[in-house]
Image: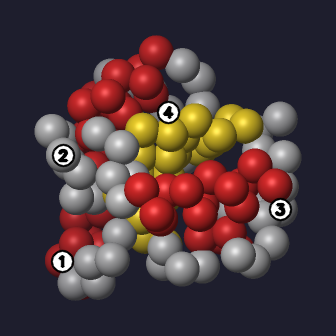
Amino acid sequence: MMRILIIEDDESILRGIVENLRREHYEVSSETDGERGYKLAKREKFDLILLDLMLPSMDGLDICKKLSTEGIQVPILMLTARGEEIDKVIGLECRLMPINMWTTSTQVPGVSGC
C-alpha cells in the first residue's frame, strides 16, 4: 500500500485530501506544522509527500531542502494556492512538482476526483 504524508496547515483542505486518499485505500499520515511534518518525514518512510509551502514553524521549501540535503529521496508534490511563476521556479529547483489543490486527487496515481 502506498504511504502518503500530507503537510498542510489548513484543516479543511487537509481533511478533504485525507478523506479522498483514504477512500482510494492509500495509507495517509498528516501534519499541520512544518517542523513536526519534517520530523515525521525523517522518522518514517513515505512513498509520496504532499507539501504546502506556507506552513507554521518551517516553510515547505525549507522542508524540501533539508530532506534533500539529508539524502531522503521521496517524490514531493507542492500544494499551494500561490501561483506566481517565481514560486514555481523555486519549487522546481527544490524538486517540487506544483499541483493545484483543487485537483490533487486527479494528480495522485489511482485517485479519482473529489
Q: Residue shown at 65%/40% (left/top)?
A: 28
* Of pointers 3 and 4, the one earlier in the residue sequence: 4
- Based on the displayed image, in which of its 4 quarters is residue 26 positioned? top right
Q: Earlier in the sequence, mark 1 or mark 2?
A: 2
Q: How many angstroms separate mark 1 from mark 3 (CA)?
A: 30 Å
Where residue 37 sits: x, y (%)?
37, 33
Label 3: state its secondary structure. Answer: loop
Label 1, secondary structure: give it. helix
Q: Which residue is mark 4?
A: 73
Q: Which residue is labeled 2 in the image?
A: 56
Which mark's residue is nearer the viewer, 3 or 4? 3
Q: Is residue 26 left or right of residue 12?
A: right
- What residue type is disc 4 on? Gln
**Helix, strand or loop under label 2:** loop
Q: Which residue bears the numbered disc 3? A: 110
Check the picture and name the quadrant holding the C terminus: bottom right
Looking at the image, tell me whether mark 2 or mark 3 is earlier in sequence order: 2
Q: Quadrant of residue 78?
A: bottom left
Tell us which disc is closer to us: 1 or 2. Answer: 2
Query: Which x, y percent locates residue 85?
Result: 24, 84
Q: Earlier in the sequence, mark 1 or mark 3?
A: 1
Q: Amino acid at mark 1?
A: Ile
